[in-house]
Amino acid sequence: MQWKDLKARLLEAGTARLSGEPADQFIARSAAGPGAGGKGSVFFAMGSHRVRLALDPLGDIEIAHRGNGIADLFYDGNQATGRLLEPGYHCPDQAFITVTGSCIFRCRYCPVPTLGGRRKTIGEIMGMVEPAVHRIHAISVTSGVLETIGEEEAYVLNVVKHLTFFNLPIGVSIYPTGQTPDRLKALGVAEVKFNLEAATPDLFAQMCPGLDYGLLWQVLDRSVELFGKNRVFSNVIIGLGETDDEMEACIRQLTSHGVIPVLRPLNPVAGMAGTPRPTAERLRKIFAIHKDALEQAGLDPWQAVTMCTNCCGCDLVPGRDG
């Protein structure tokens, strides 16, 4: 089985049960997005490929840790040998920092507003990154919204100013104001990700009440002007109710604007609990569309140095996964 087919199958499952030797050092925990508040996750790698699976003691997929990171993957009566990756913070090779672990908005697919997370101080964040510097190549920053979008932006900008001390590429993904791209560029940020989340404006309005779909497009276009090719990204969730044609239209609109889509299979939590995850067949179909759209637009995910497209644990990424 080719890696992209195996990864599509694993992303369809979304979870795995972990057995064998103790593996605490390989377990990553998320404070943001649909994976927040869970039992943690592991990154399973084969060669240069990797996939992130949430831990679930009842999962159909099994990962048996043999010790020292060596692990066997059991799926559909098959077995594959690989290794567990040690996270920097949240993902391997990066410190992926959630600044504020709460949010005033209530996007239907996201559990963060119900978790009551807090905002990290700048001292805490610097203390998280410093001991990991020897095993990371980038810093990525995301955040909820504690009070207002503008107040959150100001706080994150101050965080970024301090993080430049480490002289590593920094990627930032927050809900923006109209001036966010200019302000991040002025601080030397390498890459940005502003998330459309849904494939159509109607779905966005249903999923993210109170947020501005049109503003996101304006900010993405400005970001491409400032940061250039292969440096601007946008999450779009697969499985919110869009058709394949609607997803393709969104993908091609993003790539035609110079934005690399990050296509994230739905994690059915919060208001989407009980919604089926996208099938492996659908993920493979959309992967082919995604790959063609990137090639036609001359965009290359291999160039990403921060955030999700560089990690590629949670998504099928053309050029990296096949």
Image (cartoon, rainbow, N blue to C red):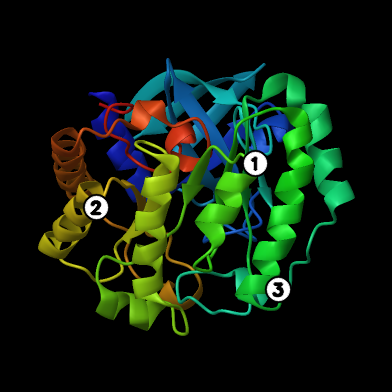
Residue 240 percent coordinates (x, y): 31, 69
Foreground: disc 2 or disc 3: 3
Residue at the spot x=21%, y=68% of the render? 242
Residue 231 is marked as none
Instruction: Tell me what residue is drawn at x 39 percent, y 53 percent.
Output: 234
Does 198 appear above or below 8?
below
Name the residue: 19% across, 42% down.
Answer: 284
Q: Are marks 2 and 3 in contact (CB under 8 Å)?
A: no
Secondary structure under the numbered disc 2 in the rendered image: loop
Q: Is residue 102 in sight in this rendering?
A: no
Left/right of residue 176 with respect to residue 303 in the rendered view: right
Mark 1, residue position: 28
Q: Up-down: is 232 above or below 149?
A: above
Residue 188 x/y as whole percent = 61, 39
Query: In the rendered image, which residue does mark 3 sit on?
Result: 146
The crowd level at tag 1 (other Cα within 10 Å; few <14, some 14-19, many 20+) is many
Q: In what element is the residue under mark 1?
A: strand
State how far apart marks 1 and 3 are (Cα).
24 Å
What's the residue type where badge 3 is placed?
Leu
Q: Which residue is mark 2?
A: 279
Rendered position, 160 above or below 32: above
**Looking at the image, which is closer to me, 169 or 64?**
169
Front one among 99 and 47: 99
Amino acid at the residue labelled 1: Ala
At label 2, counting other C-alpha atoms closer than 10 Å, the crowd grade (few under 14, some 14-19, many 20 or more) is some
Q: CA distance from mark 2 to mark 1?
A: 25 Å
Q: Secondary structure at mark 3?
A: loop
